[in-house]
Image (cartoon, grey):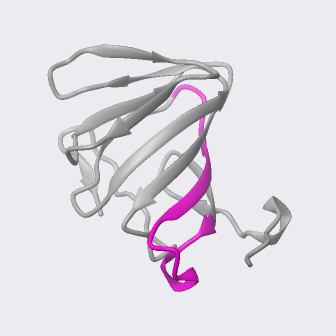
Amino acid sequence: MIIRKISDVTPVEWGNGLSHRFLVERDGMGYSLTDTIVWAGTSSPLQYRKHLEACYCISGRGAVIDADGRHHVLEPGTMYALDQNDPHHLIADPGEDLRLICVFSPALQGDERHQLAEAQFSHY
């Protein structure tokens, strides 16, 4: 059994926020579980080429914009899943951080960080 508190997990600055990575590859679960903060007012062009990801919003507001330009509002109680390695923009509204609980499959190594630039999607 694995028991961890948020105070036990050193956050990783992933590019536009912090990620507390509760479960990573070395834990042997086959997936990762993160508590991720997206800093207020940021926009992150992202694509996970090696991972599928599902995110559940627990606080804050923002949006995810898909490859077709569709804008999907994120607010507490909203989930989105990137089931096709989808390129997307993750946006946190100004004034309040966006907080997401995320699952990655396969598991993250745990030290991944994005190299963010508006001209291209950051990936790992």
Q: Which residue occupies the foreground of this view, 75 or 18?
A: 75
Picture residue at 55% right of the left edge, 35% below the top: 56
The residue positioned 67% from the left and 63% from the top of the image is 11
The image shows residue 90, relative to residue 54, as above or below, that is: above
Magenta-colored stretch includes residue 28? yes
Read off the magenta span: 22-41
Residue 105: image location, x then y, percent: 38, 61
The C terminus appears in which quarter of the rendering?
bottom left
Instruction: Determine the image quadrant of residue 120.
Output: top left
Q: Position of residue 122 (x, y in %)?
A: 28, 52
Residue at the extreme front of the image, as rendered:
1
Of the pair 117 and 88, the residue shown nearer to us: 88
Write the residue at 45% across / 77% down.
Answer: 109
From the viewer's perspective, tell me whether residue 93 is left or right of residue 35.
left
**Residue 77 horizontal/vertical position (percent):** 61, 22
Tell me the quadrant of the picture where the N terminus can be found: bottom right
In the visual, does 69 lie left or right of 58?
left
Query: Count the marks: how many?
Result: 0
Against 17, residue 7 (above or below) is below
6 left or right of 59 in image: right
Q: Position of residue 72 (x, y in %)?
A: 38, 16
The residue depicted at 81 percent of the width and 71 percent of the height is 8
